[in-house]
Image (tube, grey):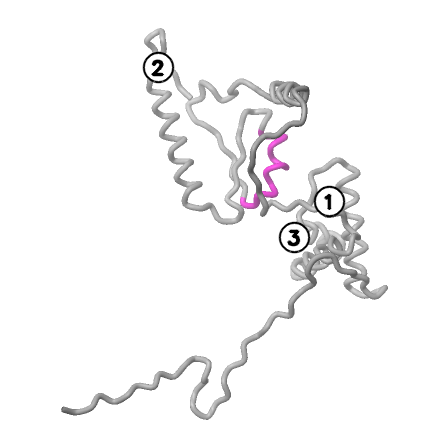
Amino acid sequence: MHEQPTEHPIRWTDGLPGMDPPRLPVKKPGPKGLARYKPRPGSKGGRILTVAVAAVARYRDEGRVNLGSREVGYVLTREGFTHGDVPYIEGIVERARRAGHIAMEAISDGRTSSDGPWTVETPEEIADQLGEWIGEAQLDRQAGQRYRVEIWAEAAAWIPRLVPVCAEYGVRVYSGSGSVPLKAVHDAAVRTIARGRRSSAPSSTGSATST
């Protein structure tokens, strides 16, 4: 029998014969937790910090929905910065939050979510909360329409911006946070099928209702 030759596969980290192994770019780790940040006066970082703090304060004073870190960058493109500066501005905004120049709650973060039980300390809190919910409740303002309207936004941070307008018309706002996941598409299809069944079901008077 002939012996099978032993294979020695070349790993991608070995490089090619006569060449040095490739070097992987290593991203320098940023600050973790609370950290001081004081850019040099007159530097690009210093200018961005000054304008960003002013923009966040302006939105707060005007009662507008908080900006996200990236949205601050887009707002600053009207202040002489370019779209290429947006990632850099986003990083500075985050460092400013860690350093206390910008309050944590002043920047919108649609990436986080939570869930848990409804807890109260007194029975009066239950009555107060129910009263608020009843005040916000509305009858279905799209009932009787042939088509159902939904609004989809790319970023979840757009939901609180669109709800004040859409709620007046009984329209719900959805977001896939940049990429609509499979479950969201499935849920939208299920809603559509359920509404179609309700619209074709006979009413108590024998006529069909539409939604």
Which mark's residue is nearer the viewer, 3 or 1?
1
The magenta region covers 154-166
Q: CA distance from mark 1 to mark 2?
A: 50 Å
**What secondary structure is the stretch in magenta mostly built from?**
helix
15 with respect to 73 (left or right): left
Q: Earlier in the sequence, mark 3 or mark 1?
A: 3
Q: CA distance from mark 2 to mark 3?
A: 49 Å
Q: Name the residue carrying label 2.
A: 208
User: Quarter of the image holding residue 83?
Assistant: bottom right
Residue 142 spot, x, y in % from top left: 49, 22
Q: Earlier in the sequence, mark 1 or mark 2?
A: 1
Q: Earlier in the sequence, mark 2 or mark 3?
A: 3
Q: Name the residue carrying label 3.
A: 70
The disc at residue 106 is 1
The disc at residue 198 is none
Which mark's residue is nearer the viewer, 1 or 2?
1
22 with respect to 76 (left or right): left
What residue is drawn where x is 42% and y is 21%?
Answer: 211
The vertical placement of 167 against 9, above or below, is: above
Residue 84 spot, x, y in % from top left: 65, 61
Disc 2, SS: loop
What residue is drawn where x is 80% and y is 64%?
Answer: 39
What residue is drawn where x is 62% and y is 36%?
Answer: 160
- Name the residue nearer the viewer: 13 or 201: 13
